[in-house]
Amino acid sequence: MSSDILRRYSISTLGLVLVALGVGISIKSNLGIAPPSCPPTILSLKWGAISIGTFTWMMHIVFILTQWALLGKKFQLRYLMQIPAAFVFGYMCDASIWLFNAIDAPSTNYVVQILLSLGAVVLTAIGIKLEVVGDGWILAGDKLVAVLSEVTKSPFSRVKVIFDIVMVAFTAAFSFIVFGLLDGNGHTVVIREGTLILAILTGICMRFTDPLIDRIFTKK
């Protein structure tokens, strides 16, 4: 039993690492980042003393409290595993951002920016699948979408689209109020075509990467 738990959490942790690397690369592209990472990034641009990773886990705590409010007595104790997952993922994002910042300045070559965004898509797609395969950590954003889908009796895919739109809309509104721009602070781009690339292509990419990962991790 203990070896199975270790295996599951190892696979899930690898998934979190890859998703965090996707966040770091997408920020590095300076072409826009995935919708769930937009609010923590724009908040960190305003309050620079607080890292993106810290704002990420703070946002996830809000997501967990929202789940609790929506589910009431149906909220299960195992859902509290989202709390350590939030901290792990948040600080992995910080480590990823630090790593890529140490390598070079944000890219200004458009072809390179597109390639970095596509790289973020692949890493995110594989990372999400590994989280599912491992069945260990639960990220609060994904769980909140599932809870909203259950409560509203709407398809998960539809709720996910609405959730992403809300994340981007909040970011754009905050950015405009604080910086007078819709896409960031004038130096770091938070919302642009890279955001759309990550929102649309990640699911498409998973159609190709999921079968490969299934073959690897279901080997006897």
Image (spheres, rainbow, N blue to C red):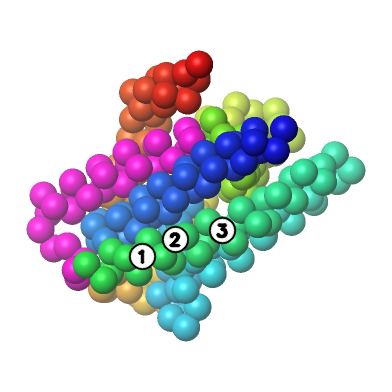
Label ID, residue 93: 2
Q: Nearer the viewer, residue 119 or 183?
A: 119
Q: Give the residue displayed 19% in from the left and 68% down from the top.
A: 104
Q: Give the residue displayed 59% in from the left and 61% down from the top.
A: 87
The residue pinned by badge 1 equals 97
Whether residue 215 is visible here, answered yes or no, is yes
Secondary structure state at the residue bearing disc 2: helix
Q: Are marks 1 and 2 in contact (CB under 8 Å)?
A: yes
Task: Say above or below: 151 vs 212.
Answer: below
Task: Say above or below: 123 vs 129.
Answer: below
Q: Residues within 10 Å of mark 2 (few under 14, many from 20)?
A: many
Secondary structure state at the residue bearing disc 3: helix
Q: Dominant secondary structure of the magenta stretch?
A: helix
Q: Give the residue displayed 52% in from the left and 39% down from the top.
A: 11
Residue type marked 1: Ile
Any magenta on residue 118?
yes
Report the span colored magenta. 104-130
Residue type marked 3: Val
Q: Nearer the viewer, residue 14 or 50?
A: 14
Secondary structure state at the residue bearing disc 1: helix
Horizontal and vertical percent for residue 7?
58, 37
| Distance in Å between CA atoms under marks 1 and 2 | 6 Å
Figure quadrant of residue 57: bottom right
Label ID, residue 88: 3
Q: Earlier in the sequence, mark 3 or mark 2?
A: 3
Task: Say above or below: 2 vs 120.
Answer: above
Can you say which quadrant of the picture contains the N terminus? top right
